[in-house]
Amino acid sequence: MKRCTGKSGLITVCVVQLLATVEREVFDFLGYMWLPIIANFLQLIAVIFGFFGAYQHRIKYLVVYAVWAFIWLCWNIFVICFYLEVGRLRRSDEVLSLYTGSVSFWEASGPGCVPVYSTNGSAPADPYREPRPDRVDGCWLDYEHVEALHAALQILLAAIGVVLAGCLIAGAQAGG
């Protein structure tokens, strides 16, 4: 019976996940998206567990990683549904910013985007919130699609990670 040897594959997936999550964390910090910041931080911790679990053959670390990777997969499905407004989900609900009024960094700062702000000189409705542009012109890709693509990449990496971690766990249990 052939044993699963996904150690190097899982280590590679973990490194790519670390890079992709750090990139996502930076842009979530720039947009003050608090719920994704917390989720990204937990993802970084879990991926480190997965990396060391694969490298040191620690089954408990791999189980933690696999369970979190499944939760992460579900979180990113929610993020895609949120940004694409599937069902009753609406981007205007501010749930990802924990109701602070913050929005995705990509809304006004995406590739090619030119934000247009009101110039009527009136005071903003809430002076403690960041001003939002009246409209954004020239974007190569709408911000909701940028966010959905980030989440889709994370889903792909998490799915591969769950399979490889499961393979290593099963291989370790079969091998003794």
Image: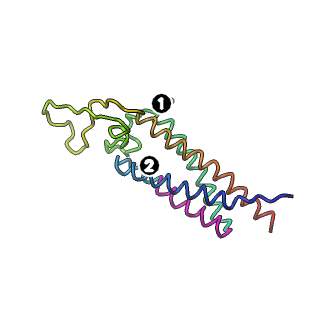
Q: Secondary structure at mark 2?
A: helix
Q: CA gap, disc 2 to disc 1? A: 20 Å
Q: Residue at x 51, y 29 (%)?
A: 87
Does the CB distance between marks 2 and 1 fall below 8 Å?
A: no
| Magenta-highlighted residues | 40-57
Q: Which residue is mark 2?
A: 36
Q: Is residue 84 left or right of residue 171?
A: left
Residue 34 is tagged as none
Q: Residue at x 68, y 68 (%)?
A: 57
Q: Secondary structure at mark 1?
A: loop
Q: Which residue is mark 1?
A: 88
Q: Residue at x 80, y 59 (%)?
A: 3
The kind of residue tagged 2 is Pro
51 up-or-down from 97: above or below? below
Residue 121 in the image: x percent, y percent? Answer: 12, 33
The N terminus is located in which quarter? bottom right
